[in-house]
Image (tube, helix red, strand yellow):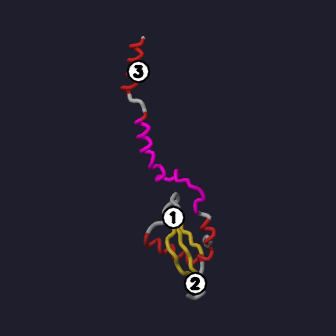
Amino acid sequence: MSSFYSEYEVFSRKNDMSPMQYQFSLLAPNHEIALIMAQENFMRRETASDIWVIKREHIRMMNREEKESLKRLDNKDYRLTKGYGYLKKKWREYEQEMLDEKEIMSWGELVNKRG
């Protein structure tokens, strides 16, 4: 690859309310040509309300040490849906311990018999 061309990353959004999404990479001699190439690509394929063209060398990626910092430091499984799987069993146990209607009504009969 010649140093005449630079690599650019293209992002777009379908409408003003949608998020930017990565689309593709391209080679171009400068930002202006890269934007024109990206626009040409979108005019043939789909509509877009906005297109961003960024020189790849201007995008900073996380290094290995920084990626390590993304790992969870604590156990907070309860925040994940799978962390609530035990609740159905717990609720069943709770319901079984609850007093049923017949038992509660029988208390009234006991009070009436005493009184």
Q: Which mark is residue 107?
A: 3
SS for tag 1?
A: strand
- Within 10 Å of the Cα at label 3, are there few (<14), some (14-19), or many (20+) other Cα atoms? few
- The residue beneath circle 1 is 13
Secondary structure character of the magenta stretch overall: helix
Number of residue marks: 3
* Position in image of residue 47 (x %, y %): 46, 66
Q: Earlier in the sequence, mark 1 or mark 2?
A: 2
The residue lying toward the viewer, choosing from 70 and 99, is: 99
Q: Quadrant of residue 66?
A: bottom right
**What kind of residue is marked 2?**
Tyr
Q: Do residues under tags 1 and 2 come within 8 Å of each other at their CB atoms?
A: no
Q: Is residue 39 left or right of residue 55?
A: left
Under tag 3, what secondary structure?
helix
Residue 81, percent from left and from top = 47, 52
Query: Which dot marks residue 5?
Result: 2
Q: Measured from the top left, where is residue 108 in percent x and y?
A: 40, 18
Q: Which residue occupies 50% across, 53% down?
A: 80
- Give, as a three-letter code, the residue at label 3: Trp
Whether residue 105 is situated above or below residue 61 in the rendered picture: above
Q: Marks 1 and 2, Cα distance to the nearest angstrom? A: 26 Å
Tell me where the magenta segment starts and ends, as one range.
71-96
Q: Tell me: residue 86, above or below residue 103.
A: below
Regarding mark 2 in the picture, which secondary structure is present there?
loop
**Which callout, 1 or 3, points to the residue nearer the camera?**
3
Distance from the alpha carbon under mark 3 to that under mark 2? 88 Å
Q: Quadrant of the N terminus?
A: bottom right
Quick one: which residue is furthest to the bottom in this view? 2
